[in-house]
Image (spheres, helix red, strand yellow):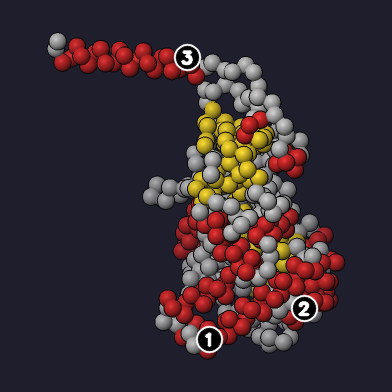
């Protein structure tokens, strides 16, 4: 038989097999598989037709925005699929200290249509166009919220000086940080301070984070997190390195600067309340209250950097919505925060990263006596977290990456640090998911629910036993 005849026969057989498989794919089991509703379903509201779109106080769209270059890293998120059925996974959503096993999740057009026990799945419909994902041995975790981040800076041991990079460099850093965030399971990032400059993409002079937020929202691509941005730090002279923040000379200038931030498109206002004198806040409670009233009248929020007790007291008395860091809280202040509903955004892992620099760098700041001082500050910060938790203060987790020494894909480190400070693993997970969503005012952030967006990731292991499991990201699937 000639070689080409054999090849023709093989092609005929392969074509026949393909046709048979296609015919089988269209056959649907007409009998649904009813089963009891799982506790995952009981936790979830009734389905809605589509997920809520992320809201942002965005400026006018930029016609000059361009997609990332073709040489950019391949995002970790899976490509879009119309319909997906994740089978036989476990669920950890920060509501309970117990893992729920044997859970299946059906996703259609980026929306979670149902959550059922794996032995009681509903019929997902035609098999053609349905992607079946074996989630066995893995755990579903809601897309996390990094409640304290700085998108335009890379972090590391030289984090402060990198805040003075030129705008073009800062934007490139932000693009890399976006991919680090999403590949690590972070769906939302709250940027609480970015340098001000002329954005090379849209030509506008304002906080660089604002143009980044707007362009990422316009692209709608799954390798970019959803962003809430505070604009630029508002300080009194001498509090931060010159050129990094907006410095106000008096209370009227502070209020005017805060108004300008919101007019330029900021989602919230960030006050810097650690002054040159560690024992004295740079502004009074009355001066802070003026800013808070103005922002609340515009449906915006105010947060305050307050690593020291003096600044934290002024911030809470002034009515801010959140305290960033809060390394020196006492019981009376924590009780006041709980009564007012003031959030605490933790950044404990910053100190842990500094301790590693004593071995990985030549910088004397992190060695010898410097290391001892860092340990003392970490212990004090852990006590503050424990005090706040006992008082009932809502705690959201942040890395402080960029503006601090961590990197953009290290929110799991902060969850570990919260457990070391005394939180239960499920409470620490909630800080990085649902409580972060509450801080943002976004009902779809940090949750897995029927009718909500399919924003979750899968890890190997049980994060309710050990937060280290959050480093073991297997699959990231975001809704568009």
The percent coordinates of residue 60 (x first, y second) are 63, 50
**Rounded to the nearest whole Å, what is the CA distance between mark 2 and mark 3?**
69 Å
The percent coordinates of residue 137 (x first, y second) are 53, 44
Q: Closer to the camera, 282 or 360?
A: 360
Residue 394 appears in which quarter of the rendering? bottom right
Q: Closer to the camera, 235 or 373?
A: 373
The percent coordinates of residue 276 (x first, y second) are 66, 85
Circle 3 is placed at which residue position?
Answer: 23
Q: Residue at x 72, y 71 (%)?
A: 386
Question: Is 155 located above or below residue 175 in the figure?
Answer: below
Question: Is 480 located above or below residue 239 in the figure?
Answer: above
The single residue placed furthest to the left in the displayed view is 2
Evaluate whether residue 448 shows in this view. yes
**Rounded to the nearest whole Å, what is the CA distance between mark 1 and mark 2?**
25 Å
Mark 1: which secondary structure? helix
**Dot 3: few (<14), some (14–19), or many (≥20) neighbours within 10 Å?**
few
Q: Residue 370 carries which label?
A: 1
Question: Is 150 located above or below residue 76 in the figure?
Answer: below
**Mark closest to the chain's N terminus, 1 or 2:** 2
Q: Which mark is residue 330?
A: 2
């Amino acid at each position: 038989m000639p070689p080409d005849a054999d090849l023709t026969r093989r092609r005929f057989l392969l074509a026949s097999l393909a046709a048979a498989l296609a015919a089988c794919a269209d056959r649907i089991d007409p009998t649904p598989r009813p089963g009891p509703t799982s506790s995952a379903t009981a936790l979830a509201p009734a389905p809605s037709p589509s997920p809520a779109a992320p809201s942002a106080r965005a400026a006018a769209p930029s016609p000059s925005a361009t997609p990332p270059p073709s040489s950019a890293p391949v995002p970790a998120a899976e490509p879009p699929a119309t319909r997906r059925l994740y089978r036989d996974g476990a669920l950890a959503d920060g509501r309970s200290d117990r893992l729920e096993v044997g859970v299946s999740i059906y996703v259609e057009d980026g929306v979670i249509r149902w959550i059922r026990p794996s032995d009681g799945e509903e019929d997902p419909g035609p098999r053609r166009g349905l992607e079946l994902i074996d989630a066995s041995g893995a755990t579903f975790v809601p897309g996390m919220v990094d409640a304290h981040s700085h998108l335009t800076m890379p972090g590391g041991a030289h984090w402060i000086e990198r805040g003075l990079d030129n705008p073009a460099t800062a934007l490139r850093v932000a693009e890399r940080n976006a991919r680090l965030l999403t590949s690590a399971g972070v769906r939302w990032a709250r940027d609480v301070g970015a340098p001000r400059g002329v954005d090379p993409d849209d030509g506008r002079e304002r906080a660089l984070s604002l143009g980044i937020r707007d362009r990422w929202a316009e692209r709608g691509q799954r390798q970019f997190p959803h962003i809430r941005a505070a604009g630029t730090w508002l300080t009194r002279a001498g509090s931060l390195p010159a050129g990094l923040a907006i410095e106000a000379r008096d209370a009227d200038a502070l209020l005017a600067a805060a108004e300008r931030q919101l007019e330029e498109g900021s989602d919230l206002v960030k006050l810097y309340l650690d002054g040159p004198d560690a024992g004295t806040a740079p502004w009074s409670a009355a001066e802070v209250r003026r800013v808070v009233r103005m922002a609340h009248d515009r449906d915006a929020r105010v947060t305050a950097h307050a690593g020291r007790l003096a600044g934290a007291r002024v911030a809470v008395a002034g009515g801010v919505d959140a305290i960033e860091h809060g390394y020196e809280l006492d019981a009376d202040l924590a009780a006041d925060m709980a009564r007012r509903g003031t959030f605490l955004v933790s950044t404990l892992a910053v100190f842990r990263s500094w301790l590693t620099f004593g071995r990985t760098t030549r910088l004397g700041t992190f060695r010898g006596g410097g290391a001892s001082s860092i340990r003392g500050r970490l212990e004090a910060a852990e006590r503050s977290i424990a005090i706040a938790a006992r008082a009932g203060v809502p705690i959201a987790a942040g890395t402080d990456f960029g503006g601090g020494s961590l990197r953009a894909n290290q929110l799991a480190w902060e969850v570990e640090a919260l457990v070391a400070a005394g939180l239960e693993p499920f409470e620490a997970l909630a800080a990085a998911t649902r409580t972060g969503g509450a801080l943002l005012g976004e009902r779809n952030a940090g949750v897995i629910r029927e009718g909500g967006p399919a924003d979750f990731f899968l890890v190997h292991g049980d994060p309710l036993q050990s937060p280290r499991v959050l480093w073991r990201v297997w699959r990231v699937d975001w809704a568009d």
